[in-house]
């Protein structure tokens, strides 16, 4: 593991590391923010999963999360969104291949060699982080769009592993959305049972843990009607009485301007679960 | 003037406009953040000047200023850093030509046709902003690096025009720094009297107005010793008893991680001058 960036930020350190990932079979980068509290003992960690086309840079440069992480004493870990490199399969479209890993373990060629972002985020990355940084095993997870899908799915499938979960503008039902259908067809083939395992709306019915979901969604988001459809999550939660706080924000779009406007609420939500 | 971006942000609007600039003879872009208070009456304006290689995007995406602007009820105007376009002279180096206007009015070929950023920032842009947006004539100015130089010089040369001034990591004495010497030689030729008019350290001695200077400087800034040299400003201010708050920040570098960590102090400084 090698540190490739280090910046002082709000009394702590915003770093970027790269390492050879065994799950993904390539070099991966991730951002780590260590708040000032990390210099005097282990701090909990919030994992952030970014959306289509993003790298480890978007959240750490645009979300203004560091101030809040410093305030609450939480480390932030923000990985890249897919395997990367010349030997890694890709597609010219922005919504498939590099930058579009969808947080699944691909089973189909040519993707199955490297596209194992589910394993990377659930297992390899936390093990690496917990071995190398002054952090505890108290974990939470959040993300945006494709990464909001990833955060919800990963929390729902791993009861006990995360203290809290939230999402901005998540793809709540990728099996019913054009982005998800395209990606899942490529990465997972035709097996609908596999698709269900990566769909938050499908997973809610059988959730083993009633972890409250905090979701923020902008009402001027261009992808709202066709790709994101928060009402499907609302219906699924209502059916089984799964706790959901869905905040619909008038005028807000799909950008980091939206995320930065409400990230304080999400950090507060995670801090109350992590710091108890 | 045409609006080319609009994003809801902290209850206000982060917009980007483009217009035909008469001072610069080209199409220019600038960011405008209108805080929620602007919907019920005119608000004061903080002008932000960015550094080398930047456009109108850097400050509005990376500084986290919008939350503070919304809190204090201040509009933020962030122009591009030079004239732009195929017909505008350029240089392959990052520190000359497009992206490196240095906030001067160039007198030398091939720069003098378009490189008039001093006039643009002092006169054309405020007139455009005050005509088209719900803002008052209460103005403040700030900036980073080359833009910190611009902010200090413009405030010092225009007594009464700005309520307050501040800078992050400014080039305080471009006539004594390699960046400034290279740019001034190209834009202004050999006339040292002209150079002096664009050098904050030179201007302090004759300042007609004792506007307090707020300057933040990271001590791990790679450009500190060779290009920025805040001690020159400190000496110049001490000599004539010009009010200066110089904050030297241990561990901080030249990046937007530094700016975002201390931008709240600067907004508070400007708000106390603008909102009285």
Image (cartoon, coloured by chain):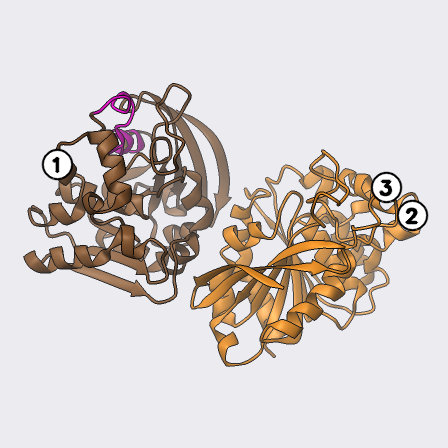
Chain colours: A orange, B brown
- SS class, disc 3: helix
Residue carrying label 1: B192
- Name the quarter where the C terminus of chain A is drawn: bottom right
- Name the quarter where the N terminus of chain A is drawn: bottom right
Give the camera-side residue of A103 and B69: A103
Nearer the observer, disc 1 or disc 2?
1
Residue A256 place in picture, x, y as percent: 54, 47
Mark 1 to mark 3 CA distance (whole Å): 68 Å
Query: Is A222 situated above or below A135?
Result: above
- Kindly indicate whether the residue at mark 2 contacts the one at mark 3 (C-beta within 8 angstroms): no
Residue B1 as seen in the image, left or right of residue B8: left
Residue B36 place in picture, x, y as percent: 41, 46
Residue A203 as seen in the image, left or right of residue A35: right
Residue carrying label 2: A192
Residue carrying label 3: A185
Residue A140 place in picture, x, y as percent: 66, 67
Please tell me if label 1 and label 2 are on a single chain.
no
What is the chain letter for disc 2? Answer: A
Query: Is B219 situated above or below B29?
Result: below
Please tell me if label 3 and label 2 are on a single chain.
yes
Whether B128 is among the magenta residues is: yes
Mark 1 to mark 2 CA distance (whole Å): 75 Å
- SS class, disc 1: helix
Which residue shows up at 33% across the image and 30% down it?
A: B132
Q: The magenta stretch spans which residues?
A: B108-129
């Amino acid at each position: 593991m090698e540190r490739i960036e280090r910046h002082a930020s709000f009394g702590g350190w915003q770093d970027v590391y790269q390492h050879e990932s065994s799950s993904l079979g390539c070099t991966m980068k991730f951002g780590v923010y260590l708040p000032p509290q990390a210099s005097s003992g282990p701090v909990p960690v919030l994992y952030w999963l970014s959306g289509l086309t993003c790298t480890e840079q978007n959240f750490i440069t645009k979300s203004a999360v560091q101030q809040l992480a410093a305030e609450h004493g939480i480390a932030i870990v923000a990985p890249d969104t897919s395997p990367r490199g010349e030997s890694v399969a890709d597609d010219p479209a922005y919504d498939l291949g590099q930058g579009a890993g969808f947080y699944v373990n691909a089973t189909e060629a040519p993707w199955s060699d490297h596209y194992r972002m589910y394993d990377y985020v659930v297992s390899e990355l936390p093990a690496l982080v917990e071995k190398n940084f002054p952090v505890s095993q108290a974990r939470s997870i959040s993300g945006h769009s494709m990464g909001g899908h990833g955060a919800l799915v990963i929390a729902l499938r791993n009861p006990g592993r995360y203290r809290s979960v939230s999402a901005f503008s998540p793809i709540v039902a990728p099996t019913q959305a054009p982005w998800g259908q395209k990606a899942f067809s490529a990465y997972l083939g035709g097996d609908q049972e596999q698709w269900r395992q990566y769909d938050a709306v499908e997973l809610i019915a059988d959730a083993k843990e009633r972890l409250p979901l905090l979701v923020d969604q902008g009402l001027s988001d261009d992808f709202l009607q066709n790709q994101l459809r928060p009402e499907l999550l609302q219906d699924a939660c209502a059916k089984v009485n799964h706790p959901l706080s869905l905040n619909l924000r008038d005028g807000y779009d799909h950008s980091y301007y939206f995320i930065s406007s409400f990230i304080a609420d999400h950090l507060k939500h995670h801090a109350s679960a992590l710091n108890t």
